[in-house]
Image (spheres, rainbow, N blue to C red):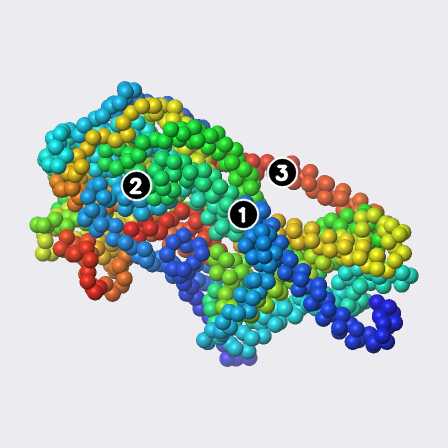
Amino acid sequence: MNALLDAFFGIPPFWLGAIGSVLVIFLVVLPAVIVMVLWERKFLGMLTQRPGPNRVGGRFGLLQTVADALKLLTKEDFTPKDADHKLFFIAPVLFMAPTFLVYAVIPFGHFGGKDYAPAIIADLRTGVFFLAAVFSIHTVAILMAGWASNNKYSLMGGIRGVAQAISYELPLVFSFLGVVLLTGSMSTVDMVRAQDGWFYNWFCFAQPVAFLIYLICAVAEVNRVPFDIPEAESELVSGFNTEYSGMRFAMFFLAEYASLLAVSALAATVFLGGWNAPFPTPAAIAASTVGMFVWSVAWFTLKVAVLITVAIWVRGTLPRLRADQLMNFAWKALVPLVLINIFATGLLGLWGRPAVAAGMWLAIALFWAYGAARTPRFHERRRRVAF
Amino acid sequence: MSGLNMIEVRTEEMVLNMGPHHPSTHGVLRLVLTLDGEIIRSCSPVIGYLHRGMEKLAENRTFVQYPGIIDRYEYLTAMFTGVLYSMSAEKIAGIEVPEKAVWMRMIMMELNRIASHLFWLGTYMLDLGANGLLFYALREREMILNLFEEVCGARLLYSYACVGGVRFPNSPTFEKHCREFLKLFPDRIKDYEAIVTDNPVFLERVDGVGVFDRQACLDYGVSGPPLRSVGVKKDLRKDNPSLFYDQVAFDVPIGTRGDTLDRYLLRIEEMRQSVRIIEQCLDRMPAEGAYKAKVPAVIKVPPGEVYFALESPRGELGAYMVTNNADKCYRLKLRCPSYNHTQFLPVAIVGQKVSDVMAIFGSLDVILPEVDR
Amino acid sequence: MSDEDKKATPEAGTEAGPTRDAPTGDAPTGDAGPITEAGSTKEATVAAAPAPAPAVPKAPAKPAAPPLELSPAGKALADAVAGLGFDLGEARPDSWGNPTFEVAPDRLVDLGTALKAKLGLSYLACLAPLDWPDRWEVAYHLYDFERKTWLALKTRIPKDQVQIPSVTPLWPAANWYEREGYDMYGVEFAGHPHLARLLMSDDWQTFPLRKDHPMDLEGGY
């Protein structure tokens, strides 16, 4: 990327990086969030036998998010009376900032050619490490928002949110470590390059357990159902962002969807092959830069869209987990599992990636059989009712 | 070293107000909770926000006027209160209701039971966080409401039962539509069970949560599915049958462990049993018949009193009616099951976690209008 | 006493497998009214009300109530209560066959204790005050799980002294019912743990359900 853009007008890379990041945010993230909000409401409607938005912007409600944004912008922006003003002001900003930082290390596509230059803002050699650091920041923001609102419900939402975020960060980051072991590098671009070729090269097949754990933790980090205890509507009336309205609430709202997009993009990058198609790139496309760029971005977008749809699907189906059950699950189930995963990856990796994949799937098959043999109790549940 | 003092760490109990405006309190109920972290130390419900003076109204409206108001006690089960009031007056006055009217009352009541349980299911899932199930449950409820609309012209508040029978004759297509609904409904129940009953997240929230103490339930006058979930086999349709409940075959499910999952399973099973009852009623209902006894335009009920009770979806719905030879009743006290259940709520949730409050409260299936009357 | 307790407490769910209730044509228990059994012929059955003048809808004649009798379960319960030795007199049936006994207010708690201890009547279904021109009355309805019928107890209080011992220590269900009785009628239940207004707002001054209270209060209380 740097080499390519150095040739562009001779602008120094730092400024290109800065301009590039701004462009990414405005041309990629914001439209994506607009589409995502609408798609979530439409898809949830489909799942729940409702039409979804269908008034604004024609039959499919295409301008719904724009209307929502305008509504939020024109709302009165107030601060509760005894709220801590500085913290109240900073909390939404601090909530948004780490989300956009994550986009710095996500490769959206590549420009082909001998250099194989990826379309990424900053190809850090410690990409995954950077992500781990960045994910922790929004925890503070949740607590700030909950505390500064001067509202018991918000405080409870903030505390629960922090507990949940901390619990699920560990398995989230550790689930990357298996892939780091297999590629030998923490850079996201290297991870995508390692998934070149056919789809069985993707890390979701070599690391199925880590992929599943990552998806669960990603949904938990974004505070979505079944992990939306911090903003549980039926108990806490919107939790830590109860007292926010207008543009401040818009920032929380935007940041939540941008986070969902970010973690889905990460999943697509690390586990689903990033910009790679399920089959090797046809030669005709590989030849041209523009073709390669469009091809890679298209596949990347498709994968991200599928992951987001799955997240919305889960939201429409499952009830909410209780706060202590949530943390039990994280600490007692996910953390041991992810540590075993790293250990197994390291051990089996001595014989190469296919061995790792085979070993993982064999273990999953064994556990599945064991679980199936031991779980007739699901059907016994109905017989608990006597007559 | 000498003089080391232990600093006591003092934690304060927090008073949380689940105020009258709350998405999950099923009406306007205020719960003042004292929390110690996530555990509830005490709870005091504040009611009365929806008090409309229905009992005073009963003393000032005639027996012909009041059935139009009585639906408002339990608006989701309006048929039950209407039949209750009418039958109380009929028992004191000795008015005989034609057979077809009795069967129609039974059919409508059981359809209303299914509708109420469906609504409960949808909103209970909302409370637990699964927004998906609400409209599926309401989809079936729509079909029932369409049936009601065919006969009564109204979907929610029917004023269907009157002293002497029912107010409206059957529509010619009612039976056909009803049987169509009954044919497809058991499959839909299976669908709900597929989504919910085996769902691990749901089971985590519900299995073993909110176990009721049996003697406490009896002490507080708990009835209906909550009482049956602790193993007490009390169903007024079997124990004190009125209408034609003793002539139809149905089973009464009771729970074994008294937790929230039992109450959920009981209500699902009761829906199935109601389908059975309605089918038998449709089979046995005479095709021709009067739907209302000949009563005078001004109904004067002789002096007397009665305590009459029905099994509503929520529990024992009782009416203590005292009459004094007037065209209005002298005193009407409606014994509403949700009143006792709301009184029982503090006993049920003290010691539980805050997140379980909604799960337990939802499983009690409380409707505030009948608490406040 | 504990044996009787165990016998009289409600049966637990110890059914062996599902039992189907065959439809019976017998008279239902606890139903003394002539409503549901007659008129099973197929043609139009129009059962007239027992007394009113048939052809003159404008002049409602004085209706006569049907003769009241206790249901079989009610009779059994009335005998059991009479056997307690409180000298309550005859049980009067209400229109559904439930036995009603008249109790003096000062013996109410003793009777209730005996009912709960000896007959196992720990389930209070309803508690309602009434406002008659010459007296106050409070009616209690207890449910007997063994005989499956209700027992009604009625007490009379003189008009000028609206006080009665509270039964909340006996039957915790009475707690809110008595608060509502106080709220609506002004009946003071002595010994109630927290006799405050329940349905009306806390600073309401009048007692709405009293017969001399108007339907609408102009300008609030």
Please state which amino acid type lies under the numbered disc 2: Ser
Q: Secondary structure at mark 1?
A: loop
- Give the residue number, with chain letter if any, for mark 1: A50
Q: Which residue is mark 2?
A: B159
Taking B222 as reference, is A85 left or right? right
Q: Is residue C8 above or below residue C130?
A: above
Q: Chain of mark 1?
A: A
Q: Chain of mark 3?
A: A
Question: Which of the 4 quarters of the picture holds residue B218?
Answer: top left
Q: Are marks 3 and 1 on the same chain?
A: yes
Q: Residue reaching furthest left?
A: C134
Q: Which quarter of the figure is the C terminus of chain C placed in?
A: bottom left
- Nearest the camera: A326 or B330? B330
Instruction: Say what secondary structure mark 3 lies in.
Output: helix
- Residue A291 coordinates in the image, percent (x, y): 84, 57
> Along the line of sight, which residue is nearer the eye, A361 or B164?
B164
